[in-house]
Image (cartoon, helix red, strand yellow):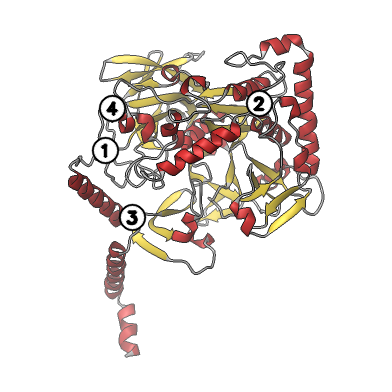
Amino acid sequence: MKGFIGSLFRSRVSQVILALSLLGSVYLLAVGRFSDTSALQWQRGHFYGAYFVDDRRLQSIDETPVPPSLAEQPKQETKKRYYSHKSFYAQRARERQQKLQRDGRATTTTAVSPAVSPRRTVNKTENSDTIFFHTAVLITQPKGGVGIRITSLQECGNKRTTKLRIGELQIPLRKTTVHKLCPWFFAPHCSLVGYYATGAITSNAEQPVPLPPHLPEFAEIYDNRRDQWKPLQLIDGRSAPAHSHRLAVCLQPMYLMADWPLIPNFFETWIGNGATIFYIYVHSISEEVDLMIKLYEAQKDIEVVRVNWPAVPTGKGDEDDHNPNNRMYRTEVATAVNDCILRSRATADLVVSSDLDEIIAPLNLKGGKETLFDIIDDHRKVQTKKLRGKVENLPGAFLFRQSFAYAENNWFSISHPSQLSFDHYRSVDYETKVWQRGYRSKVIYVPDRVFRAHVHDVIAFENRRWTTVVIDSDRARVLHFRQVNSKWMARENVTGDSAVLQAAAAGWQASYAARLDAVMKSETVNSQLVGAFNLTFSKPEWPNLGEQVLSEIESCREKNDEIKKDRCVTEWRCRSQMETLRPGQWVEPDSDAAWTVI
């Protein structure tokens, strides 16, 4: 018997037959056991053909996860399933179509371009072929030469093509999704997603670049439906031998944001980490938030670039699901992150995408005064891994894992910026648990090495030469502060009364106090810093509406949960229902000026 089995494995034909049989068995098993909840496994920015499901893990996540690879899964007894991505999406499409037919509202399954796979059912609307362009960025291509990369929003399966014109030069454009999959697996009913439109101007560094010596402020995008050329913001993001800034910070689009004490917290903590340029993406903010940003825009030791990322323009009758803003997930934050990475290519050596309530902190648990740059420089000096024994993989990004943290403060109750203090950071609590890569982790990117990035990880680099370095969590990690003590902090082991931020907090406090003092003592500066509705720093009492707005948003999210099985869940649906601040009381950029629509 052993001889018979051995002869089977020694036969190459038999080996192939056996392999195909095993694959067939896995396929049949997969078709019968798929789930509506999926987690993507990826490594080095490349998706694999198997999906991993861990129901208990996903139910514990309240933000967008980027799941880790299988090698990083914890050793615990959980319900796990594997299935083919093709069979999964085919089955999802069939079920969706059958449900629509039962409801009497069947739609056509739209074909997806070859760069976007697999296919999914997309509800067609009158504006499904509309494209919203935001920024055109000139880039240095990975193999030399100059190209163009444009961030845009459009529906999955939109087949329209277009071209860009800079002066007399016309550039044909091809497109690819920012998310890789369309729609994104975490928001399967949100069909308005981020796309890159890309084009080549020259193919190598030796070719002359047929561009004017002084770039115009705007390029032009061709609208083939109206036979018109329309202006589009143009930025020079070509790589430079030296950058004017070491670290840039991208603040993800702020929407329905009224919690103004978080603004100085964000700026001062990152200035303390060495950042000198900030890209602030604005969707909808309160007047107080607007004025706090203006305080930092007026500073001379940093550069602040406000990037308008408002709601996309809508037409008459664009209500409910016909409103494109109700078909995108969280203002399409991942596209904004990639837009910012493109912008920073020419200005900064490194760039990070950050939220307002988190700090990447060197822990210095064994004493010393190690900085964020010290940690990164250590890794940039060494070659980390070999790829197939030929090409050295070098750092293209640095990933920091996170722990929840809490420091009691009075920020919800203060009524003027002069009352804000950083003293509460002198003693903090943080969980001993370190979350896995992709779950709320944050990344410092080398911008011209990244092709696609997610909020919590890198999806793909410009080429396989680059890799992501995961920083030792005992050396530095993301401390994710909550305004209230989170449920994770209540059930996990916690490091209490830690002085890990004590020295840094003293510096943040001194820096903020000096900035505010300069404004309060200068009538000229004070008169120049005026909010959108005439608020000034000299006004003795400011509205502090952050807690009320957060409460209303949370209530709206709970209602949105009732429709998430069939429709895209977005906070834009909450805007018109809010009472604390009505639509006309938000500071919102001009949609028509920020987006070029074809």
> Residue 260's quadrant in the figure?
top right
For this view, does 423 lie left or right of residue 252?
A: right
**Label 3 or label 4, whichever comes before in sequence order:** 3
Q: Nearer the viewer, residue 215 or 490?
A: 490
| Number of other residues with Cα within 10 Å of mark 1, as a class: few under 14, some 14 to 19, many 20 or more | many
* Helix, strand or loop under label 4: loop
**Residue type of the residue flagged with mark 4:** Asn
* Helix, strand or loop under label 1: loop
Mark-to-mark CA distance, 4 and 2: 42 Å
Tell which residue pokes out farthest to the bottom in this image. Answer: 1
Tell me where residue 77 appears, x and y as whole percent.
49, 69
Q: Is residue 287 above or below residue 362?
A: above
Q: Is residue 559 above or below residue 257?
A: below
User: Is residue 317 something that shows in the picture?
Assistant: yes
Residue carrying label 1: 123
Tell me where residue 422 appears, x and y as whole percent.
75, 36
- Which is closer to the viewer, label 4 or label 2? 4
- Which labelled disc corresponds to residue 244? 2
Residue carrying label 4: 127
Mark-to-mark CA distance, 3 and 4: 29 Å
**Residue type of the residue flagged with mark 1:** Asn
Mark-to-mark CA distance, 1 and 3: 21 Å
Q: Nearer the viewer, residue 391 or 35?
A: 35
The residue under the point 73% across, 43% down is: 374
Residue carrying label 3: 85
Q: Nearer the viewer, residue 329 or 67?
A: 329
* Helix, strand or loop under label 3: helix
Tell me where residue 153 appears, x and y as whole percent.
38, 30
